[in-house]
Structures are given as C-alpha cells and as structure tokens.
C-alpha cells in the first residue's frame, strides 16, 4: 500500500492507497464534517504514516486548528506539521511565526501563500529529508470568495504541478453549496480524484473516486466521534 | 541613479536604475521575491529619496510590519514614505493613508489615484508591491494598458518605478510583453527546483541602459550571462543576501575526486592518508564570476553518513568515475543513489579519458542506464581538461538553464 492513505480503513482497503503525485478534491455540503475529515487525514498522515503535512488555512487562525487537535487528544507530531495561516494578520492577531506556523499577509496574497508553502516544502524535503508530504488546502471555496476563479485556478494549477513533481499528495477542500457547478467542473480538470461527502436525512456519507480505479467506492455512512471519523454503515 | 539596494544587482545594472526608468522583478511563484521591491524602496529612503508603496495585496500596516521584520526601521523616514492604499477598501476596512483607492478592482480608480500621486509628489521611487494582484483584480489587458500609462507619467515626472510581479500562468502574450516590451529592465527571480524549490537566484534578463557594446557581448557570451546571475537567500532580519552554493564531488576510490577539486579550485585543502581521502576535500571555485564551494566526499562506506550530511546542504553533484575501471561502477551508483535521494541536479564526469581502455561517455551512460538529460562529460582532471566545462554544465543545470 502507498504511503498516502486516508486513515479510514474501509476506504483505504478499497482504493489500496493513493499514488504519489495525486491531487484530490474533498467536496461536500456545509455542516457535513468535511473539515474534520481533512483534519483526520492530516493527523493520520503525520502520526501514523510519518509524512509531513502542510495545511493552508484561510478559514480560521492556526492556533484554533492546533487547539482542536489538543481538545480531541489527537497528538500531532509538530516537527512534521506546517500551517500557513492566512487569517491572523488580517485580523491583526498577535500570532508570531514559528517552526510550525507561518503567517501569510492575507487571504488574497496568493504570492505570499505560495512562498510559505514552498518554504515548508524545502524545510521538510531538503532539511528534514521527509519524502512524503501532504498539502491540504482549507479551502478553495474561501479563496474564491477573495479572488476570482482565474486567479485561484492559476494558483491551484501551479501547486498541483508541484505536488506531482514532488511525489506529494494534495487535498483541496471545496464547499459544494458555496461554489457553483461550473467552477467545480473547471477545477476538476486539475485533480485526479475526489473524496465526496453527501448529507441525507441527517446522516453523512463518504466515498472516494481515484483515476486509477474504474469506479467510485460505495458510499459509507460515517460519524465523527471525539474528533475521529468512524464508519457506521 | 537610484540604487536597488540588492547586493551585486547594482553592479550588474552599472549603478542602479536611472531616473525616469522602470524595472520589473519577474518572480517565479513560490519564490520569496517580493522582498526585492521592498529592499529597493528602503535603499531609496536611506539615500534620502521619497518612497511610494502601492499596497495592493495587503494593508499598508502589514507592509510596515514586514519592513520591521527585515530589520529596516522605516519610522526614521516617516515623512518620506508614502502609501497608496489599494487594499483596505477591498476588505471594507478604513484607511488613514494619504492616497486611497476607493475600488481597487477598478483599473480606472487605481489609475487615477496612482497618476495623482505621481503628479503631486517630488521625484520618488515608486514600488508596486504586487503587480500580479492588480492584474488578478483588474484584468490582464487593462493592467498592461495601465502599466504603459504609469511608466509614461513616471518618466515625465522623473520617478523611478519598480514592480514586483509573480509570474502565475497568465496568458503567454501577457508574460511575453511583461518580459520583453513594457519595462526598461527585467530581473528574473527564480527557484532552483528538482522535486521541490531548494534555492533561489536572480538574473538580469534585460536592461536598456547597459551600453550597446556590452549588451552585445553579454548576449554572445553565455558565460557572461552567468556572471549576471546570483544565488540568494532571504533573511529576516537582513533581506536579500547572496549565497555561495555548495557542490558535492562524489565517486569511488581513486576515481579522481581530489584531483577534480584541486583542478577547479583556486585554493584547495585535502586531508588524506596513504593517497586516499579519509576526510573532506574542500575548495573554492571562482570561475567567470561565479562562486561555489566544492566538497569532495570520502570513499569508504563507513563515511556514507557524511555524504548524506553534505547532500542536505548541497545544490548540485559531480559523480566522478574512472573511465578505465567499470568494476567500481556499482559503488559509484551506490554513492549517486545517496545524493539522488535529495533530488539534487547531478552530472557524471568520465575521468581518465587519456588512459588506454577508457570507456567513452556514451558507453558509461549505457552502463549507468542514465537518462538522456544527464550529461556525461569526458575529462582528464589532472590536466584540468573538461573540468570547467563540467562546472558550467552543472551550474546551468542548477539554475535551470539560464
């Protein structure tokens, strides 16, 4: 099995791991817990697979992300974690940069966000000699609130290419209610797989489709319990 | 002349930027290049000039903080540093700057505010912190038309204008006109990348005011082009600092690594015992204006951890092989594998080509099963034959083919 897995064994067993250089869209409606799924994939990647994980967060400050892991007793190996915080500086927050957290000047400054991502890649790949790196973008939909589609597309195009070249894994979160179908279709061409989430009758379901598999996995019902994803049906 | 404040760049530009001229910092995405514009404005302030910052990607206060992070005390130049705030209105925040763009997504609003500032202010150094953000908000065609106007007014009012531009994949026409047509000088700021970006360089792509004869000479002489490029690091505090790359020389015992280090270096130090290196060869290369530190690795497997240590710091690798001794190629491959795992650019030097039975570079390529883009350079290191050619080829690979 590849060094990139989701940490949800029912899905990992079916897809047999995710090949290096893959870019996946994680898409679902609001309130379906997809952000927690992203955090679970992050935790699993860093703690179990010993990968490095870079999280670009334009939804909440980095310290809240780290607090969420602490509150749920999911101990992140911080030497393998890099968070690009795109929110704090706009809110005039007092957060200072550290080995784990880099502060971008704001959510529209994609050049600055790109530099911070590259610095983490350099640090993990060249200095710490970690070969498996995950880049999680939370979220493309929020980026699209601040910048137009062409701008975000160009940014994603560049970094999807870098993921491929580095043999890394990219996961890009998209809010299905917030982003129109045409935009989603345009972005799909940059990705080679999707983690899809849907909500029906107060229940949440997840499935995965990757380009090297002929069809998607079945839908699995899941719950989030103490911060962890559990398949229930 | 207005100095850019970037070490070595002012020398390349023969003193800096003449008044009334403009310069583009053309930055590869992911490379820490926006500091160039900031360093230029700080240099102008220190020289008593007025500096104008066009803030389009983050707020003026954020940019003030960034100056402080670089250790540049702009409070000393409070009256000489003026901001055109093309950001706060975007996020609905109030602004206390003298010049405020009411709708930064409207090129006409932006245009009017910038031209007003150009007309009202004394000859200044005007830095657009992020031209790409303006292009993202206002459109490629509209921005290019506006640049032409801004450059005309800047020339008329004797300003120097400097633009930071992140070269996202815009249309080829846009990128070409930025690189070739719109500016007096273009400085390319790129990343040295294999699997990830692990080093950064700048390079003078174009400069109108460098004398014709010199420009002709530069174009016709690739080595001179190298001379106009430098590797750099960005320090906080400190800003842009030049960087001397480390190049690793590896290969099996008696392949000629120490000889190569000595052949390349003005000064070299070797530590050896009974003719074999047990510690590091080290030399400093200064060839056609390009500097590098060269390190030879020890042969013995017990020192392989040193190769790993050096690889994590190096920017390129020479693999030296004795062309007459294919029995050692397995060990050569093993040593190469260690460095390859760091994703470093490398070339193979087929040494001892003067001896009977030497395999040709093509035969060696086949035996190593090397991809076509990996050069195999024939050499006789003891006579310095092929060694500088190999150095130029490796530098070319490191800098992505300048």
Image: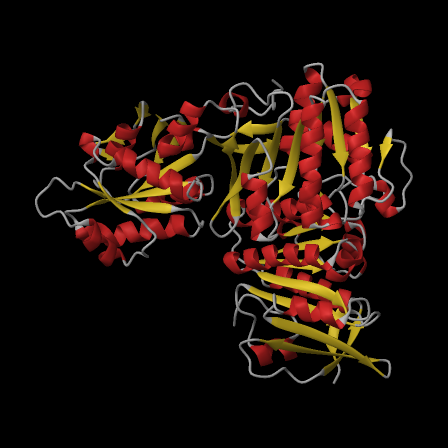
Quadrant of image for the C terminus of chain A = bottom right
Query: In this rendering, would B253 be left or right of B69?
Result: left
* Residue at 56% across, 72% down: A17
Residue B35 location in percent, x, y? 65, 33
Left or right: B262 in relation to B97: left
Q: Relative to residue B206, is residue A176 drawn left or right?
A: right
Q: Is residue B208 visible?
A: yes
Q: Give the residue drawn at x 66%, y 21%.
A: B43
Q: Please say if A79 is above or below A16.
A: above
The residue positioned farthest toward the left in the image shown: B356
Q: Is residue A125 above or below residue B73?
A: below
Q: Position of residue A47 (x, y in %)?
A: 64, 60
Task: Work out whether B63 lies above or below B334.
Answer: above
How many marks are shown on the rendered structure?
Answer: 0
**Where's residue B289, x and y in %?**
40, 25
Question: Is residue B291 visible to us here?
Answer: no
Query: Closest to the observer: B234 or A107?
Result: A107
Q: Quadrant of residue A140?
A: bottom right
Nearest the camera: B148 or A45?
B148
């Amino acid at each position: 099995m590849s060094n990139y897995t989701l940490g949800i064994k029912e899905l990992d067993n079916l897809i047999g791991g995710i090949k290096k250089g893959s870019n996946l869209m994680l898409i679902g409606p609001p309130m379906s817990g997809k952000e927690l799924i992203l955090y679970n994939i992050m935790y699993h990647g860093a703690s179990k697979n010993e990968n490095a994980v870079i999280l670009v967060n334009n939804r909440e400050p980095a310290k809240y992300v780290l607090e969420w892991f602490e509150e749920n007793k999911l101990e992140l190996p911080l030497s393998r974690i890099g968070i690009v915080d795109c929110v704090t500086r706009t809110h005039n927050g007092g957060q200072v940069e550290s080995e784990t957290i880099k502060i971008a000047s704001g959510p529209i400054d994609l050049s600055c966000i790109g530099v911070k991502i590259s610095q983490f890649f350099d640090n993990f790949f060249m200095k710490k000699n970690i070969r498996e790196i995950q880049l999680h973008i939370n979220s493309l939909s929020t980026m699209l609130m601040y910048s137009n589609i062409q701008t975000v597309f160009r940014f994603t195009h560049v970094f999807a290419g870098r993921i491929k070249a580095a043999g890394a894994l990219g996961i890009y979160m998209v809010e299905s209610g917030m982003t129109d179908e045409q935009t989603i279709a345009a972005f799909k061409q940059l990705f080679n797989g999707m983690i899809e989430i849907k909500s029906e009758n107060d229940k949440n379901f997840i499935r995965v489709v990757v380009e090297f598999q002929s069809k998607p996995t079945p839908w699995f019902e899941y719950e989030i319990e103490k911060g962890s994803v559990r398949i229930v049906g | 002349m207005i100095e850019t404040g970037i070490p070595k760049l002012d020398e390349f530009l023969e003193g800096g930027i003449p008044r009334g001229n403009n310069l583009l910092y053309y930055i590869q995405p992911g490379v820490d290049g926006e500091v160039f514009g900031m360093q230029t404005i700080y240099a102008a302030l220190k020289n008593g000039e007025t500096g104008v910052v066009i803030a389009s990607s983050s707020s003026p206060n954020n940019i003030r903080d960034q100056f402080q992070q670089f250790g540049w005390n702009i409070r000393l130049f409070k009256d000489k540093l003026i901001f055109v705030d093309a950001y706060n209105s975007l996020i609905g925040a109030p602004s206390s700057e003298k010049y405020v763009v009411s709708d930064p997504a409207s090129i006409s609003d932006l245009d009017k505010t910038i031209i007003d500032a150009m007309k009202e202010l004394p000859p200044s150094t005007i830095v657009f912190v992020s031209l790409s953000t303006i292009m993202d908000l206002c459109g490629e065609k509209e921005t290019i038309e506006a640049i032409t106007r801004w450059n005309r007014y800047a020339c008329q009012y004797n300003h120097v204008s400097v633009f930071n531009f992140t070269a996202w994949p815009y249309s080829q026409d846009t990128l070409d006109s930025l690189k070739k047509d719109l500016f007096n000088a273009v400085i390319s700021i790129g990343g040295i990348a294999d699997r990830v970006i692990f080093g950064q360089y700048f390079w003078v792509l174009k400069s109108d005011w460098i004398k014709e004869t010199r420009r002709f000479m530069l174009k016709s002489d690739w080595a001179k082009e190298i001379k106009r490029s430098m590797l750099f690091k960005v320090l906080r505090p400190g800003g842009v600092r030049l960087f001397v790359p480390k190049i690793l020389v590896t290969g099996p015992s008696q392949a000629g690594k120490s000889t190569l280090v000595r052949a390349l270096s003005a000064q070299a130090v070797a530590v050896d015992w009974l003719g074999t290196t047990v510690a590091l060869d080290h030399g400093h290369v200064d060839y056609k204006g390009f500097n590098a530190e060269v390190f030879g690795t020890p042969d013995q497997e017990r020192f392989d951890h040193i190769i790993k240590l050096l690889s994590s710091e190096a920017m390129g690798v020479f693999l030296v092989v004795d062309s007459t001794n294919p029995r050692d190629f397995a060990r050569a491959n093993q040593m190469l594998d260690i460095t390859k795992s760091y994703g470093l650019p490398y070339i193979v030097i087929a040494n001892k080509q003067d001896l009977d039975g030497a395999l040709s570079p093509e035969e060696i390529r086949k035996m190593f099963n090397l991809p076509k883009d990996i050069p195999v350079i024939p050499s006789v290191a003891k006579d310095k034959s092929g060694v500088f050619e190999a150095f130029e080829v490796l530098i070319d690979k490191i800098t992505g083919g300048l």
